[in-house]
Amino acid sequence: MKRLSRRIALLALLVFLIPCLAGCEKSSSAVELETKQEIWDAQLERITSYVDEMISSTLMNATYEQFEQYVEGGNRFGTIPFDQDLMRRWGDFTELHGRVMDARCIGTEREEDGYVSYILLTGEDGEMMRLSVYSSENNVPVRTTLERYAEDSGKTMGQRFKEAGGNTVVGLLVVFAVLVLLSLVISAMKFTNAFDGKKKAEEAAKAGEPVSFPKMPEKTETVVLPQEDAAELVAVIAAAIAAYTEEEPSGYIVRSIRKVKKSRR
């Protein structure tokens, strides 16, 4: 029983020691990688400073014509192929954007056969292009390339995905904000329509009130005239009708005569 307990304790100790040993080994390899990375970073910084001091300053402080006279006069800036290549790229940039107003090295990367440094050129028209300077393992400039520069050309894929994700989130927030605003506007329109409908109903009610007109007399008074006066009145009315119609009064019979009160306007 004691032997079994000892074996179990030894096994448990080994289980705890194996990760520790692996961690120590991993830590040493990580330290080695960090050291190499620091050396590479320091080398890239030295190359960037060299390119900035030698090539960028020359591009900014001299003109293409001066550099062309310098090279054609038998002088050497770097190697002969590099001088010819740099002069050609410089001439292409001058034709497109005029004199180089600003030149600065924005970084250096390591490649399989050497290094490549990126110089950002700004012309008289404000346009920018990127001059790539390729160097050997011994940091000797070999060749150059000239290409159009975009603001995100120097960004890594992770940085681009991060910016794209941020832009997507902002776009979604804007869309939701617009939808909420539209829903509020529609809700406000309902209240506005209800208020307008109530106002129109009140105006219609006011417009539908009955207009007061003077009332006609409900009853007419019958005036009884004496027999002689009635006969004279009938004769006068018959004569007026005959004069109006231009016919004989024999065709009309006056049945009754009533006095009607005139309404005041």
Image (cartoon, rainbow, N blue to C red):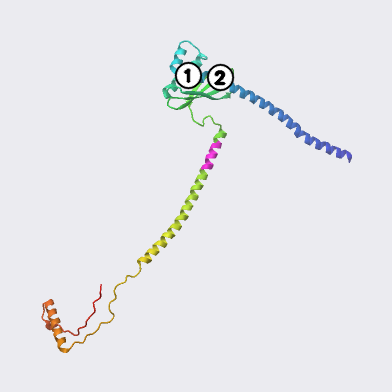
Location of residue 226 in the rendering, given as x and y in whole percent from the top left corner:
17, 88
Q: Are marks 2 and 1 in contact (CB under 8 Å)?
A: no
Residue 37 x/y as whole percent: 64, 26
Q: Earlier in the sequence, mark 2 or mark 1?
A: 2
Magenta region includes residue 169: yes
Residue 45 drawn at (x, y percent): 59, 23
Q: Which residue is mark 1?
A: 61
Residue numbers of the magenta segment: 161-170
**Magenta stretch secondary structure, dominant:** helix
Name the mark on residue 50: 2
Report the residue at 44% width, 18% height from top: 64
Task: Please determine whether, in this image, residue 225 is positioned above or below residue 105.
Answer: below
- Magenta stretch contains residue 177: no
Please give left or right for residue 233 compared with residue 6 in the image: left
Q: Amino acid at mark 1?
A: Asn
Q: Nearer the viewer, residue 154 or 106?
A: 106
Q: Quadrant of the C terminus?
A: bottom left
At 48% from the left edge and 20% from the top edge, which residue is drawn?
60
Quick check: 152 above or below 56?
Answer: below
Pick the quarter of the image with the N terminus.
top right
